[in-house]
Image (cartoon, rainbow, N blue to C red):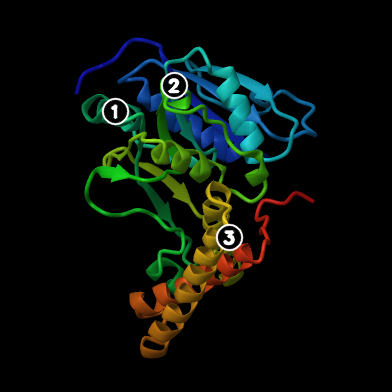
Amino acid sequence: MTVETRADTAVLVATYRRPDKLAKLMESLAQCRAFIDFDIIVADNDPGSTTPLAARTNWPTGLSIKVVLEPRPGIAAARNRLLDEAKEYPRLVFVDDDETVDPDWLQRLIEAQKVSGAGMITGPIFYTYPAETPPWAILGNFMMADMRDESRMVSAASTNNLLIQSQALYDPITLRFDEKFGLTGGSDIMLTRRFTQAGGLIFFEKTARVHEEIPPERANARWFIKRAFRAGNTDARVQLALDNRIAAHVRVFGLGFLRLWAGVALLVTHPYINQSATGAKALRMIIRGTGYLYAAAGQAYSEYNRK
């Protein structure tokens, strides 16, 4: 594997009140410098912040880090601020503030872009679950982790692990994160689907790995059910935002109805959700289908609503 020395890459991180997790991310990013030089830009999305983020977080030395405050609430606003701050970089790489990365993660993304020629490159996320996690949440892949053991083109991607060639944001169309999805999630799926619908290419590189630990306070049935419902609701809302014709609303309603009842049928024949992956996935289908129907009724679920 070759070592790249040009500082033409910006790693972009939106954060909101996660200083400890952000510090762990920085520690893992420091290991990537063995392969490539890069800058880091952090957008602090806490409008009540009175202390510079860098001053209250214990980060490793030797990293080039710029911290900006984005007072407008919502992940989409923070992501757009990062795009503005990094507009001079030819290569942008998004990662979430509660993740860690493999030492060769960044290099794997860059090499995959050079080989594939795609405007965007994504990779897998590996989850670690606390012991108290409901077994059905893991069996049913409620976190929707893409675990297929193959690199390939995909139609959309999340910004939890995403390289973007800067010109891809302007060719074939101009792209920004839709701030209507700021507190619901989904602005990244919206942006990347617009990109592929316009003819852009996104390549999934199986070796560009990031990791996330599910915190104990989320390892419960209520949180995983809400997560699956929000995923279905957001996916359907993205489809409707891309195509708001009556036919699209009918299609989304039909997809939600089919997911719901297909899940019910599977669950009847595989009722032991803590022992059967099929039964657990059937439960996920039911919940996601309900999220679709909620979107078809014109409703949005704000998982990240701030009180």
Q: Which residue is mark 1?
A: 113
Using the image, determine if residue 101 lies above or below residue 300. Answer: above
Task: Farthest residue to the front: give it.
Answer: 246
Whether residues under marks 1 and 3 lie with C-beta atoms below 8 angstroms apart, the answer is no
Looking at numbered disc 1 in the image, what kind of residue is underneath it? Gln
Looking at numbered disc 2 in the image, what kind of residue is underneath it? Ser
- Is residue 160 at all visible to an observer of this figure? no
Residue at 35 percent of width and 74 percent of height:
277
Q: Which residue is mark 3?
A: 246
Whichever of callouts 2 and 3 sits on the residue coming sooner in the sequence is 2
Q: Residue 85: give x, y in percent of width and height.
A: 59, 18
Q: Which one is in front, 196 or 85?
A: 196
Whichever of callouts 1 and 2 sits on the residue coming sooner in the sequence is 1
Q: Which residue is mark 2?
A: 166
- Is residue 287 at all visible to an observer of this figure? yes
Whichever of callouts 1 and 3 sits on the residue coming sooner in the sequence is 1
**Mark 2 to mark 3: distance in Å?**
35 Å
